[in-house]
Image (cartoon, rainbow, N blue to C red):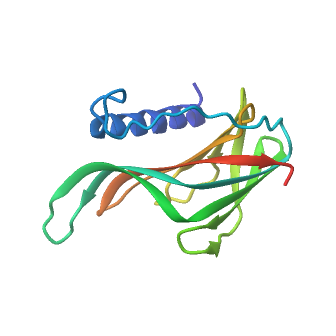
């Protein structure tokens, strides 16, 4: 297993573990909100526009004044939609430009590694030390989109997951 795949696998394991701590059993959890989803098939195009207002946060938050740590999870509807424009560049790379719904700002383009299996999996490339690793998955069979960011610092050890949909060829 190469280092990139090991990193992605570890990131997914940590995210799953954090969510399992916060949610007693997915089937009986008060957070369980499964419903049928039928999205449009995208096909494998070179550009995608993905949007999300749904955010799940899970992890540990530390109050720096009291030094007490709390564990938990939240499911939120963000007030503004965040948009990701994803352009496949070939040679296993993609350019991702995000318009953040939280602060209404256009962020600088970032380069991601791309794996194409039954869908697309993008992982942040050349991540500077201290910056959160990012992962994007797109199921081209139903237009579903997931963005994750995991980070640890003196205030928190948490994962954010944005859930949304994509359009292709935009």
Q: Quadrant of residue 53?
A: bottom right
Q: How many marks?
A: 0
Q: Quadrant of residue 90?
A: top right
Q: Is residue 17 above or below residue 125?
A: above
The quadrant of the rendering that contains the C terminus is bottom right
Q: Is residue 111 above or below residue 102?
A: above
Q: Position of residue 56 (x, y in %)?
A: 44, 49
Q: In the image, 123: left or right of 48?
A: left
Residue visible at 51% across and 32% down?
Answer: 9
The quadrant of the rendering that contains the N terminus is top right
Q: In the image, 52: left or right of 68?
A: right
Q: Is residue 64 above or below residue 113?
A: below
Residue visible at 21% across and 65% down?
Answer: 63
Q: Position of residue 88 (x, y in %)?
A: 81, 47
Return the residue nearer the eye: 24 or 91. 24
Q: Is residue 53 above or below residue 37?
A: below
Residue visible at 67% across and 46% down?
Answer: 165
Return the residue nearer the eye: 147 or 95. 147
Q: In the image, 106: left or right of 53?
A: right
Q: Quadrant of residue 83?
A: bottom right
Q: Position of residue 97 (x, y in %)?
A: 71, 62
Return the residue nearer the eye: 129 or 36. 36
Q: Position of residue 159 (x, y in %)?
A: 42, 49
């Amino acid at each position: 297993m190469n280092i990139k795949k090991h990193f992605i696998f570890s990131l997914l394991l940590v995210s799953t573990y954090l969510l399992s701590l916060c949610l007693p059993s997915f089937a009986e959890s008060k957070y369980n909100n499964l419903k049928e989803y039928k999205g449009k098939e995208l096909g494998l195009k070179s550009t995608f526009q993905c949007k999300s207002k749904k955010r799940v946060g899970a992890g540990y938050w530390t109050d720096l004044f009291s030094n007490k740590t709390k564990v938990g999870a939240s499911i939120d509807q963000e007030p503004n939609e965040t948009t990701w424009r994803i352009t496949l560049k070939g040679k296993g790379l993609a350019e991702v430009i995000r318009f953040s719904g939280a602060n209404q700002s256009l962020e600088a383009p970032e380069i991601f590694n791309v794996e194409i299996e039954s869908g697309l999996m993008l992982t942040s490339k050349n991540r500077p030390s201290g910056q959160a690793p990012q992962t994007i998955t797109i199921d081209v069979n139903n237009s579903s989109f997931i963005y994750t960011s995991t980070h640890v610092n003196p205030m928190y050890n948490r994962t954010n997951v944005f859930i949304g949909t994509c359009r292709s060829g935009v």
